[in-house]
Amino acid sequence: MATEQARGAVERYSADDVKAWHQARGVRMTVGDVIDVNNGESMSVGFVRYAKRAANRWTLTYDEALIVTKGVLTVETESGSRTAGVGEVIYIGRGTEVVYRGEEDAEVVYVTFPHWLDATQRSELASQLDEYDELTKAEADAVISGTE
């Protein structure tokens, strides 16, 4: 159940606030929420990191905005691809099949509506979550640095 934030509250988050990192099995990428069903009313916010040339497939069950904060990220879809660098945003609508790819080491903030995990767990695409493993922060850092 979601815990409602106090009206007028202002919060600040960084990647250090991610409680649990996850990795697409065999891919040098990590993803973790800072706002989820436990502290957000209707959306998720988190961080995803890709090592250079790392890529994974996914089908969205939610709407998503990706804000690149480091490096370059490409999102490929059936209708083409979009590449964004620092300070740029890629928007993806629910139902879209994608391949996310770090063109170089990339860090991205994602915002989803509704909560991506909840929406995926409730969908016919829930099995795509089976391809992700939970990591500690140290393990997640090692995946991205290539020292795992």
Image: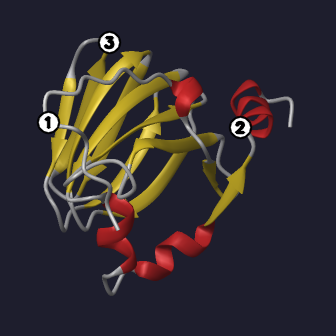
Whole-number angstrom distance, CA of label 1 to CA of label 3 = 31 Å
Which amino acid does the dot numbered 2 rest on?
Ala
Q: Which badge, 2 or 3, is on the more N-terminal residue?
A: 3
Q: Dot 1: what SS?
A: loop
- Please name which of the two marks, 1 or 2, marks the residue nearer to the observer: 1
Whole-number angstrom distance, CA of label 1 to CA of label 2 = 34 Å
Image spot of residue 55 (x, y percent):
52, 45
Image spot of residue 67 (x, y percent):
28, 26
- Please name which of the two marks, 1 or 3, marks the residue nearer to the observer: 1
104 on left or right of 5: right
Disc number placed over residue 7 in the picture, else none = 1
**Identity of the residue drawn at 31% across and 42% down:** 75
Can you say whether 54 is above or below 132 in the image?
above
Disc number placed over residue 86 in the picture, else none = 3
**Identity of the residue drawn at 53% across and 44% down:** 31
Disc number placed over residue 140 in the picture, else none = 2
